[in-house]
Image: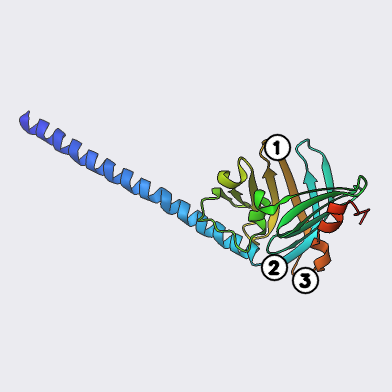
Amino acid sequence: MAQFMQFIRSAGRRAAIAGAGAAMLLSAAVPAAQAQATAAAQKIADHFASIPSMHGDFVQFDPNGRQSEGKFYIERPGKVRFDYANAPLRVISDGSNVAINNRKLNTWETYPLSQTPMKLLLDRRINLSQANIQSVKEEPDLTTIVMGDSSVFGNSRITMMFDPKSSDLKQWTIRDKQGRETSVMIYNVQEGGNIQESAFKIPYTAISQGQTGNR
């Protein structure tokens, strides 16, 4: 009986050691898997950020589910333009500020690009090792990267969705400080090419003087 009990205690110790070793291997495997996933996502993000300019068509869904569409133009770093079809709206970023223009009402609303997570999409590089990365999810047909920085954007964040095979950006969703989400899907995308500098020009002087007209 004494030998049998010694065997049980010895087996128990071996099982405990084996269990602890397995737990250590598992805990080490999780960060390794995360690092591998982030590395693959970083490669996709690097490809997207290496494209100096692009343009194409977009479909937008606002927080109320309303759909609109039009043409978009992007030029790094920080420049973007959305021209809405069948609506008197345009959105322009010149790399410093974002301006929303209602041509029918002749109104302009401007705010710093640095205050919106859209800046993260338009940066020269999307660095997934920085603190502004909230999550990276990899699926066979979609890689999703969520970015935000509460110290800069508050509750706002941007979710970018890429095709893992081509590394092409397919969609992004911006959540504002009130938790409302606006999604933009892009298609017929043409990479590269020259976009006229005037496309990203915001008429600051005319806006301040109220002389913008419908330009």
* Residue 146, position as x, y percentages in the image: 60, 48
Tell me the kind of residue under disc 2. Pro
Q: Residue furthest front?
A: 209
Q: Residue furthest left?
A: 2
The reply to whether discs 2 and 1 touch (Cβ–Cβ < 8 Å) is no
Tell me the kind of residue under disc 1. Arg
* Residue 25, position as x, y percentages in the image: 33, 48
Q: Nearer the viewer, residue 167 or 62?
A: 62
Kind of element beneath mark 3: loop
Q: Is residue 183 above or below residue 76?
A: above
Q: Residue at x 68, y 60 (%)?
A: 168
Kind of element beneath mark 2: loop
Report how far apart the C-alphas of labels 3 and 2 lie in the structure: 9 Å
Q: Residue at x 82, y 42 (%)?
A: 67
Residue 8 location, quadrant: top left
Residue bearing the label numbered 1: 180
Q: Identify the mark nearer the N-term, 3 or 1.
A: 1
* Residue 214, position as x, y percentages in the image: 93, 53
Judge from the rendering whether residue 166 lies leftward or rightward of residue 10; answer left or right: right
| Total number of numbered discs in the rendering | 3
Q: Nearer the viewer, residue 19 or 80?
A: 80
Does residue 123 appear in the picture of this structure? Answer: yes
Residue bearing the label numbered 2: 52
Quadrant of image for the C terminus = bottom right
Q: Identify the mark nearer the N-term, 2 or 1.
A: 2
Tell me the kind of residue under disc 3. Gly
Q: Residue at x 50, y 56 (%)?
A: 129
Q: Nearer the viewer, residue 127 or 92?
A: 92
Label 3 neighbour load within 10 Å: few <14, some 14-19, many 20+: few
**Which labelled disc corresponds to residue 193?**
3
Judge from the rendering whether residue 91 lies leftward or rightward of residue 85; answer left or right: left
